[in-house]
Amino acid sequence: METPIKAAAQANDHPLRLALANEVHARPFLSLAAPERATHLAMTSGEQGAAGDHAHLTALCQRYGVAFPPPGANHFVAELDGYRLKWERHTEFCTWTFLKAGAFATPFAQNAIDFAPPDWVAAIPGARLVAVHVAVLARADDNPSPEDLGEWLHADYLVGSVVAGRAATAWTDFRLHPDGFARIVVQDHGLGTRQSGRLVQRLLEIETYRTMAMLALPMAREIAPKISTVDSDLLAIMDAMPNAQALSEQRALLDRLSALAGRIEQATAASAFRFGAAVAYADLVGHRTQELREERIEGLQTYREFLERRFAPAMRTCQSTAERLTQLSQRLTRAVALLRTRVDIAVEAQNQALLGSMDQRARLQLRLQQTVEGLSVAAITYYTVALAAYGARALETAGLHIDKDIATGVAIPIVAVAVWLGLRRFRKSLEKDERK
């Protein structure tokens, strides 16, 4: 039964406390005891492939009758029938590491993955990007001879160094062999079981993260010519801008700039994740290489030297392409803003000219309206006075003594003033309604 103090402490815990505390213990190193073989696969199942990877792992565990990881787990280790499996789920790929302990006559004649069910191995989800066999030789054995290494690895591409504080020696050739797998040979000189596991995992992670980082290189090579083309088009547009005085010419240049900006934004959106991931993976490769604590073997390149000569330039190419993409996007943004300002100024000048023209037409219309208004007063007065004359004539016929001509003459100014005042009042009423 929990004490009140412990219960109160748990009640105040942050909901993520346990998960965050366990995170630093995620993906633990395995213990290896030489001689031992390992096979490592990295499958690019994608960010949405976690459920499929978990289901495939569960199927293997059920086949052997062992417990399987809960949904959402990102690492798992299982002791199966004569071999071990370490499974790790990463953001965009999944790793499957098979380990087989025990003596072996010749490295790579039979590998750890050969002990797993072939049908299950063939159905592992995703595309195979990394495949490595590792042979850890027992400390009682002598270092393999150059002839042995030449048989197991490509002698012309051999890379090796003394690692882990002189507790082991590691060799590889960074080449794919006829079975489609790369190979690593480790000679144990006095590694502890945990130290051996850490060393093998670091070597495998160097291969995995190196390859994952290299995924950005083909994209960089594909994007580089597009950047050069857009750069040339931008330079041509900038050269044409001072000579584009007409608004139609400026708008045509703005349309071209907008199209270039759209192409660059599309390339940026398509490559941002890949280039960002390459930087992260390359950083991990650098850390894992440093953790090897290498010492040179006379006549061989070390891991660090090989990576600095081959891997680092590829990463610099990717970084340079990403930087060129960013700089070109910024230049396009400035060019679009500059040209849009010129277009806005030209449109504003046109609008001012149009407003001036409209003002002149409004004045002419007002004068015409005033003229028409005067004519309207005269016309209405004329017809009204004519009607009054008919009325006076009718009254004269009825026997009233009215001088028709005098009555008509008197009615003219009265009617004219009344009509003018009426039209003026009507116009003011309309202006008042417009102001509302």
Image (tube, grey):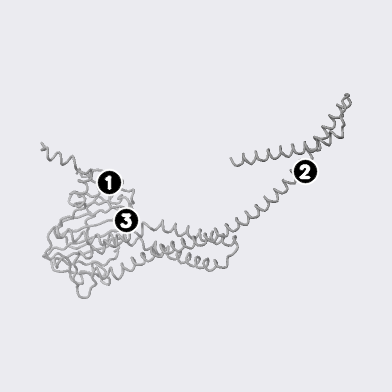
Q: Nearer the viewer, mark 1 or mark 2?
A: 2
Please name whichever residue, 71 or 100, is drawn nearer the observer in this view of the structure. 71
Query: Seen in the image, is 6 located left or right of residue 89?
Result: left
Q: Quadrant of residue 279?
A: bottom left
Please name whichever residue, 6 or 262, is drawn nearer the observer in this view of the structure. 6
Q: Position of residue 135 (x, y in %)?
A: 20, 61
Classify mark 1: helix, strand or loop: helix
C-alpha distance separating marks 2 and 3: 94 Å
The type of residue carrying mark 2 is Leu
Q: Position of residue 169 (x, y in %)?
A: 17, 67
Classify mark 3: helix, strand or loop: strand
Q: Position of residue 257 (x, y in %)?
A: 51, 61
Q: Residues within 10 Å of mark 1 (few under 14, many from 20)?
A: many
Label 2 sits on residue: 375
Q: Nearer the viewer, mark 2 or mark 3?
A: 2
Farthest residue, direction top: 398
- CB under 8 Å between callouts 2 and 3? no
> In the rendered view of the protein, which quadrant contains the C terminus?
top right
Q: Residue at x 28, y 49 (%)?
A: 119
Farthest residue, direction bottom: 299
Q: Residues within 10 Å of mark 2 (few under 14, many from 20)?
A: few
Label 1 sits on residue: 54
C-alpha distance separating marks 1 and 2: 94 Å
Classify mark 2: helix, strand or loop: helix
Compare marks 1 and 3 and give the one earlier in the sequence.
1
Q: Which mark is residue 128?
A: 3
The type of residue carrying mark 1 is His
The type of residue carrying mark 3 is Arg
In the image, residue 346 sits, relative to residue 404, either above or below, namely below
Compare marks 2 and 3 and give the one earlier in the sequence.
3
